[in-house]
Amino acid sequence: MQDIEKIYKEYSTTVYKYLFCLTQNKEFSEDLTQETFAVAVEDIKKFRGECKLSVWLCQIAKHIWYKELKKKKKNANVSFEEIKEDVLYDETLEEKICAKEKKLNFFKSMQKLDEKSREVMYLRMVGNLSYEEIGEILGKTSNWSRVTFYRAKQKIREESKNEK
């Protein structure tokens, strides 16, 4: 029991930060962090030690997050109020459409990246994590994270130049 508490104290912040990068929601990230450790306690015997414990926990967290996304997607009903709030008048409709189109193109470009590059981009840009933290989460070095981010950024820039 003490080992589980020690693991939780040592890695809960890392798992929470990782999930917050993915969800951008404090409460949801906290819930998913708790669920991650509940699953980890049940499956600790499956941990083979081939990677860092933090990497294993983040992989569990990612799979739990994917499950939650699938559940939410099935139950998604967009209300009129949500749509109305989305079209606020501080920007013109044209500006919003252009911004959404740029954002959409950016994420389409990111989807063309390999999984690790895409994950590094999300953690760095959305989560504002350092290269060292990204390396720790993904079981790599900070230098690997830095180089992967730079190369992914270059690929996206190249793609956007080709689209124009």
Image (cartoon, helix red, strand yellow):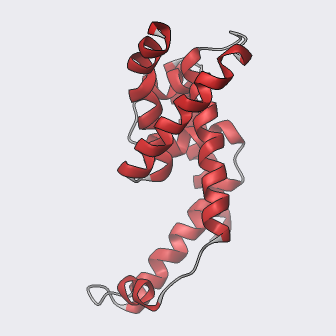
Question: Percent x, y for residue 21?
Answer: 45, 45
Residue at left 61%, top 31%?
Answer: 39
Classify residue 137 as left or right of residue 162: left
One can see residue 77 in this view: yes
Give residue 131's quadrant in the image. Answer: top left
Give residue 90's quadrant in the image. Answer: bottom left
Q: Nearer the viewer, residue 94 or 162?
A: 94
Residue at left 36%, top 49%?
Answer: 26
Q: Nearer the viewer, residue 24 or 104?
A: 24
Q: Nearer the viewer, residue 163 or 128?
A: 128
| Placement of 60 over or under 140, stated as above or below | below
Q: Pick out the residue farthest to the left.
A: 90
Residue at left 59%, top 47%?
Answer: 65
The total of numbered circles placed on residues is 0
| Placement of 4 over or under 149, stated as above or below | above
Classify residue 71 as left or right of residue 141: right
Placement of the C terminus among the 4 image quadrants: bottom right
One can see residue 118 in this view: no
Residue at left 55%, top 34%?
Answer: 36
Question: Percent x, y for residue 116?
Answer: 66, 36
Q: Nearer the viewer, residue 96 or 81?
A: 81
Question: Percent x, y for residue 89?
Answer: 29, 90
| Placement of 81 over or under 17, stated as above or below | below
Question: Percent x, y for residue 59?
Answer: 63, 32
